[in-house]
Amino acid sequence: MSDVVATNQTILVVGGGISGMTAALEAAETGKQVILIEKRPFIGGRVTQLYKYFPKLCHPTCGMEINQRRAKANTNLTILTLAEVSDISGTEGDYTATIKMQPRYVNDNCTACGACNEAVETEFDNDFNYNMDKRKGAYLPYNNAYPQQFVLDSRIIGTDDADKAKAACKYDAIDLDMQEETLEIKAGAVIWATGWQPFDAAKIQPYGYDRIDNVITSVEFERMMDPFGPTGGKILRPSDGKEAKDIAFIQCAGSRDRNYLRHCSRICCMASLKQSTYVREKYADEGKASIYYIDIRAIDRFEDFYQKVQDDDNVTFIKSKVANIVEDKKTGNPVLNGVNTEGYHRYSNPHELVVLAVGMEPSVDKDIFPVEIVLNNNGFIEADNKNGGIFAAGCASDALDVNRAVQNATASALRAVQVVNRVARAED
């Protein structure tokens, strides 16, 4: 990777999720040289882990494939995976970023035939499926991963499994001698698009995520629905593997709470409304969804979707912040306790499965940010002149749904282009 060429008229995009891809493609399609780095072995981010978008309930694969085609066709764009920024120095128009690149142990000869996967025996938790199943030590992150190349987990390097993977490859694509690299990349502007991470549900002690098997998170439920996911598209209880047809969705799990995340994560209401339709999709009239909410924030174009879910007789809305969840030891059912504020009736409701609509928080901890930058109290990057030529895109700037994240990323690309244009004019 030492042949990467960058100047102070290059735009560096940090993070290869939907926002980073959008910003990089928009800037590259104006003719600017763009380098996109992503710490995972593939680009696409958390959107690739979704089953469906709201409100149209379409699958994300079509949109991702369009972006992948755009990326392949654009010679102005260089994509580096397994890469992270460790430091940034300089000022607007003249930055130097230090990039650490982890070895893939697989080169460009890879045809994604899967022979290495078949040869390897060691398994590890599958982080793509939020550790709900296992994957081999030689793996393709997911079916449509880009780049379409396998990866060797560094934990098998030096073991018999690594040798088996190399021996099985007919295309000389396994390179066990790959080493970590450090690159220094020049850039006139930087777009920070490191996205978000789900709030750690285990911190919400009253909800028992870490001690009640049949309490899961919204992101785990999303993977469960995917036909290529950990359960083959079936809604199965972790405790006994039985299908769950009576499912509770708890809103604001970790959001709008001074003990956890103070901010509204904006996507959670719509995510639960969307996921309530999954129950009907799987079980028709047998499926029942109960949504426990403080208030439903479904504005603008989402109102019609909200109304459609409200009109479903198999979906029940309970206006309540659930006080706690306990487990019925006999059935394994989580039992929700609280007060319905519409009439102030106490309830103790058992369900077969509980889904926590966890909030969004920034992926990069503000205490270890690699550059001096203005952050708000929630850890998101502020639009502040003090940031110079560093611009946040998508969920690095705030909790946003996909549509708004893409719009935000496009705006950030424009700002970055303006910076490098000024650099170009100054040097003419």
Image (cartoon, helix red, strand yellow):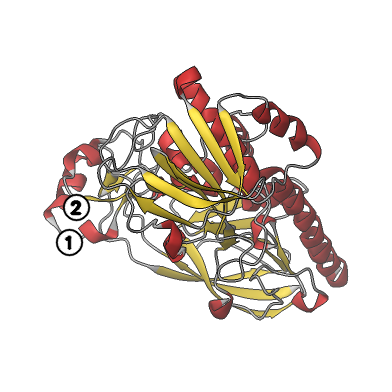
Circles 1 and 2, Cβ within 8 Å, touching? The answer is yes
Classify residue 140 as left or right of residue 314.
left
**219 to 255, vertically: above or below:** above
Using the rendered image of the protein, determine whether residue 148 is visible from the camera's viewpoint.
no
Observer-nearest residue: 148 or 351? 351
Where is residue 206? Give x, y as percent: 44, 61
Secondary element under disc 2, as helix, strand or loop, is helix
Residue positioned most to the left: 160
Where is residue 315? Give x, y as percent: 57, 30
Q: Mark 2 = which residue?
A: 162
- Amino acid found under the numbered disc labelled 2: Ala
**176 to 299, vertically: above or below:** below
Where is residue 290? Give x, y as percent: 54, 37
Residue positioned most to the top: 285
Give me the residue at 27% from left, 43% from top.
Answer: 239
Give me the residue at 65% from left, 56% from top.
Answer: 265
Q: Mark 1 = which residue?
A: 158
Classify residue 204 as left or right of residue 394.
left
Give me the residue at 31% from left, 42% from top.
Answer: 238
- Amino acid found under the numbered disc labelled 1: Gly
Observer-nearest residue: 268 or 402? 268
Secondary element under disc 1, as helix, strand or loop, is loop
Q: Can you tell which quarter of the image residue 47 is in?
A: top right
Q: Which mark is residue 15?
A: none
Observer-nearest residue: 90 or 424? 90
Cα distance between the residues tagged 1 and 2: 7 Å
